[in-house]
Image (cartoon, rainbow, N blue to C red):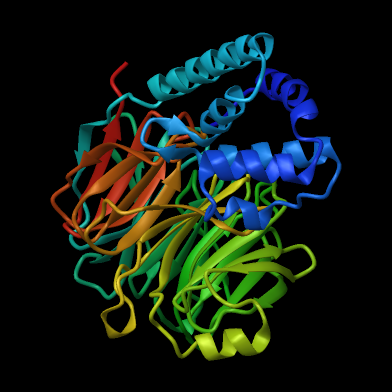
Amino acid sequence: MAISSNIIQKLLRLLRPLMQSESQRKGYLMRSLGMSTPVLNRLVFNQPVDDFITDMLRELVALSETTAGKPALCALLEAIREDVGEDVKVSIDELLQEIKKELTEQKNQVDGCYISIKTLNGHLDSVLSVAVSPNGNTIASGSRDVYDGLRLRTIKLWNLTTGELLTTLTEHSSPVLAVDFSPDGQTLASASNMEFQDGTIKLWDVSTGKLRQTLGSSLVSLRTSCVAFSPDGQTLATGHSDAAIRLWHHSSGKKLHTLRGHGWDVNSVTFSRNGRFLVSGGLDGAIMIWNWRNGERIRTLNRPSDFFGSLVSWFDSSVGSIRSVAVSPDGQTIGSGGSNVGDKGVFNSPIKLWNTNYSYEMRIFTGHTDSVNAIAFSPDGKIIASGGEDNTIRIWNYQTGELIQTLEPQSLVNSLVFSPHAKILVSGTDDSKIRIWGIPC
């Protein structure tokens, strides 16, 4: 759920005289949301009225619906309506109509259904990673397959529109776990499982298909699970099996920082669109938000943030692992996908949404019946896609939690990525195929 600034201003004018005291504030919220709502614990009730109302509206928008079809904000207005005069009731009724109209328009915008447009065949084994170039013209895919009988694993570049195979890149000697295009589309970064007398991170010239540079070379280079370019293209973040995140200068290949905090493998890294922070997810079940420019960890989600609590949690796998993290285009929401069963058979919700600023769990999605390997926000911020080991891709309205559509590629889903205009979704699956899904015009 999202509301316009125009409605927010109307709400401020309406609510100011009705929420002057702490008792008024608490009373209306308890009546509309219930006494056990977590919102009551997060709000500061003794702050100035405008600050309180702004924080409260943010919480109610994030909470979305209290019951099916009733947004929390509407529930609050309906509770207030019972206590006011006829003139204020008219204002509330008008606001309720405006809010419902905006929500209907939002729902209509995300209700377009994806269909299978094209299937790309060329890999001979599992497709573990996919990426789409910033101009939307090219797909990169990393795989477990072997090139021409040699111990060289492949990356393939494809024309997204025609499905034509453009070139095959073959310098990795182990499965290619991750690929990502630089923001200018001229460089492709890739990462593999293990290399001997070489590095697991490689940078490619997209136009020529030539290897530009290898990062982190050593006698034995262990797994690099994920790669992501910063929005300005100057920095490459990589996640590793030694629980570290390494930041590299794109042009020189020089290592800038090493971020430590995870207990086990780092499985996924991603930057916010504005470049303010980096998010990582790991095998230890932790999601970490970083000020990547100075190496400071801002906060930890899904795990204790203090050192000793975190240390103990490394040996507790009941929360399962995080396999994929994503940040909404506005930077306000983090999505995480992971294993659905932890230690001792404890069931976990494989998809969770988190508020970036206040670090609380906003919503869980429970449609998948097995672990989730990939999660991606659409570039327009309207939907989120998830794919996993139940052989399905699910499309959600992440503002309301509504499941919009289920796609069935008939194979375990390893990777998902949207095209820049959001009307194309690309999946990489265990049956060696790349599927292109699109919304008909």
Q: Quadrant of residue 293?
A: bottom right
Q: Position of residue 108 (x, y in %)?
A: 39, 19
Q: Front-most of 350 and 172?
A: 350
Describe residue 178's horizontal placement relative to residue 32 as left or right: left
Describe residue 300's horizontal placement relative to residue 285 as left or right: right
Q: Front-most of 2 and 15?
A: 15
Numbered circles on residues, count: 0
Q: Pick out the residue farthest to the left.
A: 410
Q: Position of residue 88 (x, y in %)?
A: 67, 14
Q: Front-most of 99 and 412?
A: 99
Looking at the image, can residue 329 be seen?
A: no
Q: Front-most of 412 and 213?
A: 412
Against 232, residue 8 (above or below) is above
Looking at the image, can residue 97 be seen?
A: yes
Describe residue 329's horizontal placement relative to residue 23 as left or right: left
Q: Pick out the residue farthest to the right.
A: 48
Q: Write the residue at 46% across / 90% down.
A: 315
Against 412, residue 28 (above or below) is above
